[in-house]
Image (cartoon, rainbow, N blue to C red):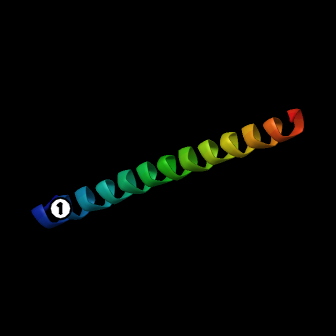
């Protein structure tokens, strides 16, 4: 493999990893928001 092909593969791999990390971060934010909203609903029902 040439240096250019190695560079291309490396860039693609890094982009995929960044994409996976962004997806995990977004999922965590959504899960956190869901839990917060659920807690608020439960507190309102208890009041």
Q: Is residue 33 above or below residue 11?
A: above
Quarter of the image with the N terminus in it: bottom left
Residue 22, position in %: x, y?
Answer: 44, 54
Q: Please determine whether, in this image, residue 36 is positioned above or below residue 26.
A: above
- List x then y, in percent, for residue 44: 83, 41
Report which residue position mark 1 lands on.
7
Look at the numbered disc 1 and give the secondary structure of its residue: helix
In the rendered structure, the answer to whether residue 13 lies left or right of residue 41 reads left
Residue count near mark 1 (Cα–Cα under 10 Å), binned few <14, some 14–19, many ≥20: few
Q: Residue at x 36, y 54 (%)?
A: 18
* Total count of labels: 1
Vertical relation: 23 (above or below) 47: below
Residue at the outermost top position: 46
Q: Is residue 24 left or right of residue 34?
A: left
Q: Image point 75% across, 42% down: which residue?
A: 40
Between 22 and 32, the one nearer to me in the picture:
32
Q: What residue is shown at x 82% (from left), y 36% (from top)?
A: 42
Q: What is the quadrant of the C terminus in the image?
A: top right
| Image side of residue 28 versus residue 16, left or right | right
38 or 2: nearer the viewer: 38
Left or right of 44: which side holds 30? left
Q: Position of residue 32 (x, y in %)?
A: 60, 42
Q: Say which residue appears at 17% left-offset and 61% top-offset.
A: 7
Q: Position of residue 28 (x, y in %)?
A: 55, 44
Q: Residue furthest left?
A: 3
């Amino acid at each position: 493999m040439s240096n250019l092909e190695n560079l291309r593969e490396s860039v693609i791999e890094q982009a995929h990893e960044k994409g996976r990390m962004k997806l995990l971060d977004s999922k965590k934010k959504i899960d956190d928001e869901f839990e917060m909203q659920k807690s608020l609903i439960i507190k309102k029902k208890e009041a």
